[in-house]
Amino acid sequence: MVKPLLFRPKLITGESLSNYLLRLCEANRYFHISYISDLLDMKLHQVHSNSFSNSALETLSLLTLKDKENFYSRTTNYYEEVLGKRLGSQLILKTNVKCCPDCVNKDVYHKIEWTLRFVGICPYHRVILVDNCSCCSKKLTFASLINGICNNCGLAINKMKKEVILEKDALYPAQFYFQRLLKQETELLWSKMEQYSKSFYLLDGLNSFVESSINDRTSVIQSFVTQKHGGVTNKKLSLAFANAYWMFNNFPFNFYKVLDEFYQKSYQVRKYQKNQFEKLFDNGEFKVIEEAYDEYWKLQVKLRNAHYNFTVLYSSDINGSYSNYTKKDLMNQYSLTRNEVNQIWNNKEFLTEVKRGGEYKEVFLGQYINDVLKYLENKKNCITKKEVAVRLGLSIKIVTRLVKGGYLTQITVIGSGNNFFEKVEVENFREKYRKIFIDNNPMGLLYGNEKGKKIEYSLITLLEMIDEGLLVSDTAFNKDQIISILKHQRKQKSTLISKHFRSGERMYSLEELTKLFKMKSSTIHKLIAKKIITIDKIVKTPKGNQRYYFSKNEVDGFLSNYIKVPAAAEEFNITKKKLLQFIKNGQLVNVLHGMSRINLLKRKDIIEKFRVHNKK
């Protein structure tokens, strides 16, 4: 039979049951707390963790003649019952302890609220609860509290560094709220702790949204939801709870801010944490949060700032009314090809950037979707360049020449692609030149029977001959007939040109100059504009085109006065590199600077340069 102890001290407000056992030992002059634990049939580590079995509580009630229920509310078992097994394992301290250095004295070693991880400050002294020695950083144990010193370095607990929390600090309103929760109904405590603990899956790893004296905005939020943060300190966990409190305080504005930052995490991390957070909605009590959460993702889907999985999940809710579109959306929803979508993406006017997973991604702006619809409507009456080539019996390269010659018009569509042609225009063109494209094989007329061997005229030439009436579209014709007409035409042209020149005078055409000077015709036009070479005659052809001719004296004068760098290097026995260096330094002037890649020099400048150089 259990006999009551001689001395049975009164319970102190807020003390844990383990603390009471220590005072019970001291009151009855027991040397060690193990005397009491043996009577209760408990191990020391159970006493240190403030965890008591039902039989131990009954025995203690008989030893002290006190109500068992008063003891039970001071154990971690009570909060395990309130919070549940899963939440209790996360939110109750057992192996380690924390304390307020100003509260620890000869009567109070340990308070019940210090076993709760969401309680981070002392409400009486407004200091951060200490769980590590401020001298050696070792974790405090229950033995440290009993002895009043750090078991590692010997620093007295009441001498440890304290951090005071002011009312304006972000931690203060959160901790004040948690203190009120402890005094209210247990159902509300469970509800709020379930809400906050799940929110850590969103917050963990983000920069802090609140400022405190113990951190700045660059501090990373750490909690107990990831394994690597399993040993998170009270200071960091208090900051995490302050952020969770802030997130739901100005709901849903702050909640959406957190979701914006959460969505920048990598997909692999985000996927797991998102699934864990959504387990909060298994309980119908959090319907308001669930609705706000769903609205956020619907908005992201509408903006096309969401992963494809979200698009599939929420697309039915928004009825396809997107603000932006991804490439996949345009292909799936409007049956565009990948090539067509890539052409759209070449036009940056249609695009905007959204940030997802820490990376910026381009999406198509929904305001331009009418351009897509218009293109799809026009596309029904259009064919591609490849289809035009097949219809006319030509190569794609020759179709391109027809476009440059103005015979066919390409349609510019959304994006930068313009490889479409109106069917009506192509058919009208084919009918107009039916003797080429219907009655004949156009490639046979151009190349004959020998594959790859081109004859003396191009398709454009044939079209011009029909337009000029040299070939009658209603009359059949063949290669020999075409060549005969061309020879006659050239003879007439030669006769016409000869009328404009003095007898026996040698004249050079623009085409001849390009070969003689080894320059493009565009470069020669620039020489004409700078008056480096002068046109002698301008002859109008029967079609109204102008042909330029240059006298032999003009051409000879140009060749004697100007020379290219490679020729100058050979003639003056100097390296090309040296000449180019002279041009770069401004010692020689490139006549074609800014007009061509060709480096053209005046002979007299080179001669003068070497004369000065030789004098030196």
Image (spheres, grey):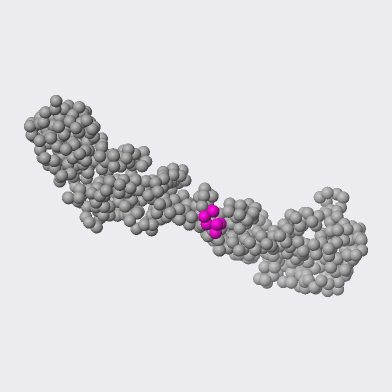
Taking the spot 92% from the left edge, 63% from the top edge, the residue there is 475
Count the marks: 0
Residue lying at 36% horizontally and 51% vertically, measured from the top left: 207
Residue 31: percent from the left, percent from the top? Answer: 10, 29
Q: Nearer the viewer, residue 452 or 356?
A: 356
- Judging depth in this view, the residue of 603 and 271 nearest the camera is 271
Q: Position of residue 17 (x, y in %)?
A: 18, 37
Q: Residue furthest top?
A: 1
Dividing the picture into quadrants, the one containing residue 146 is top left
Is 595 on the left or on the right of 189, as rendered?
right
Indicate whether residue 319 is drawn in magenta.
yes
Q: Residue, x 61% and y 54% (percent of image)? A: 333
- Quarter placement of the C terminus: bottom right
Q: Position of residue 75 (x, y in %)?
A: 22, 38
Q: Nearer the viewer, residue 599 or 521?
A: 521
Q: Is residue 424 left or right of residue 262?
A: right
Magenta-colored span? 315-321
Based on the displayed image, in which of its 4 quarters is residue 417 positioned?
Answer: bottom right
User: Is residue 59 among what the camera can see?
Assistant: yes
Q: Is residue 487 above or below residue 141?
A: below
The reply to whether the magenta stretch includes residue 152 is no
Q: Residue at x 83, y 72 (%)?
A: 542
